[in-house]
Amino acid sequence: MIAGKRMLSASPQTLGSGCQGDDSRAALTFLGAELLADPSGALLWPAEGILAVADLHLEKGSAFAARGRMLPPYDTRATLNRLAGLIATARPARVLCLGDSFHDRRAAERMDAADVARLRALTDSVADWVWITGNHDPEPPQGFGGRVVEELSIGPLTFRHEAEPGAVGELSGHLHPAAAVALAGRRVRERCFAHDGAKLILPAFGSFTGGLNVLDAAFDGLLAPGFEVLMTARGRVYRFPCARLSPDRAR
Amino acid sequence: MVEAAERGESALLIAPTGGGKTLAGFLPSLIELAERPREGLHTLYISPLKALAVDIQRNLEQPIAEMRLPIRAENRTGDTPEAKRRRQRTHPPHMLMTTPESLALLLSYTDADKLFRTLRCVIVDELHALAGSKRGDLLALGLARLSRLAPAARRVGLSATVSEPERLLAWLSRRGRHDGSDSDDVRLVLGRSGAQAEVEILTSQERVPWAGHMAMHAMKEIYERVRRQRTTLLFVNTRAQAELVFQALWRVNDDNLPIALHHGSLAVEQRRKVEGAMARGELRAVVATSSLDLGIDWAAVDLVVQIGAPKGSSRLVQRIGRANHRLDEPSRALLVPANRFEVLECRAALEAVHDLTLDGEAPRPGGLDVLSQHLLGMACAAPFLPDELYEEVVSAAPYAAMTRDEFDDVLDFVTTGGYALGAYDRFQRLKLREDGRMAVAGPAVARQYRMNVGTITQEALLRVRLNRGPVLGEVEEYFIQGLTPGDTFLFAGQLLKFLGVREMEAQVAKGGTGDPKVPAYAGGRLPLSTHLAERVRAMLADPRQWDGLPEDVQEWLRLQRYRSVLPNRDGLLVETFPKAGKQFLVAYAFEGRNAHQTLGMLLTRRMERVGLGPLGFVATDYVLAVWSLRSPTDMDALFDQDMLGDDLEAWMDESSMLRRTFRNVALIAGVIDRRHPGQEKTGRQVTFSSDLIYDVLRKHDPGHVLLRATRADAAGGLTDIRRLSDFLARVRGRITHKNLDRISPLAVPVILEIGRERVDGSATDELLAAAEAELLAEAMPELAPPRPAKLETWRPQQGRLSL
């Protein structure tokens, strides 16, 4: 994706707090802040040393198993491993988890001891780890380190779980945005970042989290009509205007 | 049959269609019940088709009523009303007609032992179509359970002619095997075979086309044949072909003959209407796919036309058998090859039919996913002892070779998910009781089982509705998603304009202009069978066999001999030549399209590694063509068998085929839920989440039972991999390489095929980048990339080339 790279070169990625550069990331300027969208679905704000991820949904697999659907129990491990990889290369000073980090109130009880240790080590390795609360985890479990807030404002930007209509400079998760494009007779549907200059909605980061098409009614009234998506597909980030996207279902 | 029944023996009746097979199956039961009236379920009839179960029941009603027999016969399928089902369990009929899925459900009820205790006879119809499939696996396990509940019940199998009856005998056996020993428990009964079929190949006045599959050149001649017969059945290989052939026939239908269309995507009511009209003799012709291969017998078909090569001799025999169901008259059939290679293939098929050589498939072991569904069902019926259930399971032929370890793995999967991590030991679905029996953990587990029973999985389908009017049928969702409002496509025999999707239905209007996008249905194409491929190779290599081929085909082969060489029977001919600034390699492997596609992918990977700059490839049933920047010279090294090693493994893991297979396995094994009407979850979301599960599982638990089942399935479905490996072994040291200065006559069809193919999945990255770059260039020309993005990372692109 050479075009994307050219755009990146206009915004030096290695400035700031040690976030490593990566060809596959896409740059965007959001209310003056220079941000990078990572193909994993994480968002980097190099100038502030921030790494943000949304909707980890840890222990989603075991939540299903408790109800008789024996999904593999490895989703927590897979999610944490991907997050650890990102932290190792980007070395952020602050990690923001934008809510629904734990699939339910009893997630911690079900978590495998090795995964508990993994998560503790991860929160220990970062100077400031912030759990923003979400509807799945209004009270995130204790004992994993980090601090709990409802929302967090830094400079022009506010991080929270659910987008609020009309808010400006807001970054959120909750909706699990995904986008689909029709290409020469086939269709690609992947998770995406969606933004309209005032709001940015992050894709879900968790290994077992599905996506909701950004053209779904749930996004109505949140994103301005001419919004853009940054779609994460096959280890890269692709930009598309909303006019290029295809809905899952006609409304 | 009656004799076998009197001795209580099981029997397999093999007879051509129309031999009165089904009645023969029921006759002993009718006699027995007439002589000794009794209460309770006596005979169970199982058919792969719901419609057939209903049909048989209706057909039996008549003699029962006429002879005033004290017999009640009923059917039970997914469509049977709840009240009737309940009554059937409390007051069972004497004879019950049902499907494998409905039987599995019946067996999972706690009163199954009471219901089936009185059973004396189980009839399995169209056994050849069930054995070897997952539905067959499920049914075999069900029969094993029936034998435990009703040890006196004998089994009757009804089958069309097959190449290896031993396999069906084993399938039907209560021991799960048939080895010619004294303990064999199934008797083989061969029905009287009818007169030898009269089959001819259409010798068209037109020139035989170089490529293509539609046989449009012969439509007028086909129509003439239709006009001369009372009733003609026209078989094609894919649904898309059916639509096109149907259109083409109507274009030349000057007499307005009633010609209808029948394929699996059409609405059920529509299909029933066509079948009804056909049975009443109101139609002159029906264009059909395999949707009419099975089932309903029509006595009045005068001619069967096979358009396009039949791909296998067993299939051709079955289709020919649809004509004229009177044993004393020969069936008549006409083969219409659509291109030059198909002329050879039709000839090979014709000879195979005359020699009565049928192509058989090697048996595959029963699916682990099906077994896990069955184990859960058995636990729902009653707590079981694992030792006893294991003995029962291995008495079913598909599972006869299953080890106890394997069985325990599946049982562990059913109980706790069977993950190496052992994380779910506290969420058991089955609980071990003090008496050593396994029981379901609660009523929710049984509910879940009953919602998900069955092994039929399919692509998500959307209904196609005409202007809020009638539903025309169903089409795969992915096809609709590739359309934008205003696009036109052929469906249900008409040109339709796509309006949009509303409430889970594709809304369409009649008419519209422009080139139609023909429905590209999944799974229509069957590869050429190994057996026919051998015959085609032999025919090509031996000019003495060319007599009787159309003159232009003979001329084509003579020119090939003059300009290059003919492919020989056992080796491999590889031609290389330059064209349009690219180097072409054409391999005449004759191993079927799927095997060639895999070969193309492996060859291009290898060519990329040695710096030959491969650009793309295209595969047909007969040959593979690869084009590249530089031409390879060492063919022995290029076609070395070791290509089936790491490259294949890596490709299999990534391929969407394996993901789809995994989804089906996960559905059958009950890890993800089936879709039910009215549920929010769409097929796409199921696909999506099963992909997530697949990725995580593959990384963290590669030996898990679900992945083992997936690989076994893929290997079974991918018989082309085995074919490919046999092929590479066979041609080793026998490769003839012809380096030509231009394209050879034999290579023309495949080169023409390039450009017809749709772009394959591997090209998606480039497409994404190109779509994005296009938009960027439009918006910001100054930022336009200095060179096309697609050169950055090369991947083989299938079928994209402008000549």
Image: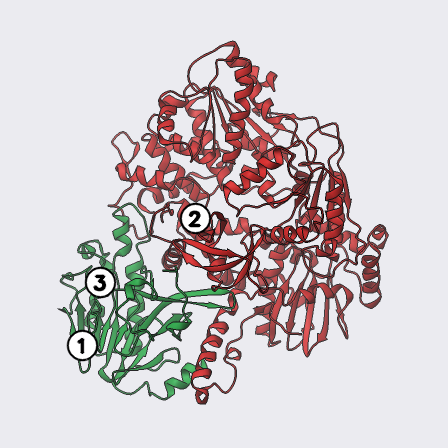
Chain colours: A green, B red
Instruction: Check the image and report above or below for A227 versus B534.
Output: below
* Residue where numbered disc 2 is placed: B665
| Circle 1 or circle 3, nearest the eye | 3
Does residue B455 appear to the left or right of B574 in the view shown?
Answer: left
Residue closest to the far top: B35
Q: Secondary structure at mark 1?
A: loop
The image quarter containing residue A129 is bottom left
Label 2 CA crowd tier, 10 Å (few <14, some 14–19, many 20+): many
Residue carrying label 3: A100
Q: Hey, what amino acid is under mark 1? A: Ala
Residue at 39 percent across and 22 percent down: it is B115
Circles 1 and 3 in contact, beta carbons < 8 Å:
no
Check disc 1 and report the residue beneath it: A127
Quadrant housing the N terminus of chain B: top right
Residue A73 in the image, given as x and y percentages of width and height? 30, 54
Considering depth in this image, is B667 or B182 the residue closer to the camera?
A: B667
For label 2, the SS is helix
* Residue at horizontal 62 percent and vertical 36 percent from the top: B278
Q: Amino acid at mark 2?
A: Val
The span from disc 1 to disc 2 (Cα, nearest Å) is: 45 Å
Residue A119 position within the rendered picture, expressed as x and y whole percent measured from the top left: 22, 65
Of the residues under marks 1 and 3, which one precedes in the sequence? Answer: 3
**Mark 3 crowdedness (10 Å alpha carbons): few <14, some 14-19, many ≥20:** many
Rendered location of residue B260, percent (x, y): 62, 44
Q: CA gap, disc 1 to disc 3?
A: 22 Å
Q: Chain of mark 2?
A: B
Q: CA distance from mark 2 to mark 3?
A: 30 Å
Q: Amino acid at mark 3?
A: Asp
